[in-house]
Image (cartoon, grey):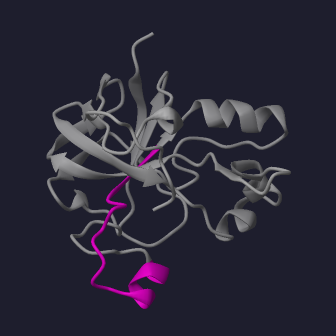
Amino acid sequence: MTARVLAVHRSPTHSFSKPTVERIRLLEGLGVEGDAHCGVTVQHRSRVRADPSQPNLRQVHLMHAELFDLLAEVGHAVTPGLLGENVTTRDLDLLALPVGSRLSIGGAVVTVTGLRNPCRQIEALQPGLLARVVRRHDDGTVERLAGVMGVVSRGGVVAAGDPVAVSLPPGPHLPLTRV
């Protein structure tokens, strides 16, 4: 199967969910044009409070639609954009990518920086959802399932139906951690 974009989303406000739009424009080094998280430095409110000079490694949020399928199996109705992603993909194992993977999407390139670490706001959306997207294993390890974050390495327009091509970085590959 060819990996593809299922839907794209943006919001000019720091709302949790993002409405679906026909297309988004990715701006090199900044993020999604018209999205509250667009910028060279961090835009997420808690990160701005901690240190507003930090580089923005969370310019684009990508989520795999297969997560929605898993959540539906346990009674959570989640649709594209509801969890705040900018790009919803299908047929791409985002969580298995190493740091530095380059995703060619439409005319743009996004370089994967790490895993999204969802906050407690997700519980207001649907009680019990946080425990489904952040799993704590018996050995103490934490598994984050809420997609990946990236930076825009080449700007361009991205729309539903666009194919996604993956280029892995030179080895050794580093596993994704939260950013």
Give whichever of 137, 22 is nearer the camera.
137
The quarter in which the C terminus is drawn is bottom left
Q: Is residue 129 left or right of residue 172?
A: right
Which residue occupies 14% across, 54% down?
28
Reply yes or no: does residue 172 show up in magenta.
no
Q: Please tell me whether residue 167 is drawn above or below residue 136 in the rendered image.
A: above
Residue 124, quarter of the rendered image? bottom right
Q: Is residue 119 left or right of residue 155?
A: right
Residue lying furthest top: 1
**Residue 8 horizontal/vertical position (percent):** 39, 42
Residue 159, quarter of the rendered image? top left
| Residue 19 shows in this picture | no
Which residue occupies 84% across, 38% down?
74
Give whichever of 166, 28 is nearer the camera.
166
The quarter in which the N terminus is drawn is top left
Residue 42, quarter of the rendered image? bottom left
Q: Please tell me whether residue 136 is drawn above or below residue 108 in the rendered image.
A: below
**Residue 165 horizontal/vertical position (percent):** 29, 24
**Residue 26 horizontal/vertical position (percent):** 21, 49
Which residue occupies 44% across, 80% down?
47
Give whichever of 177, 91 is nearer the camera.
177
- Extent of the magenta region: 45-62
Which residue occupies 37% across, 55% down?
10
Reply yes or no: does residue 47 show up in magenta.
yes
Q: Is residue 19 left or right of residue 155?
A: right
| Residue 119 shows in this picture | yes
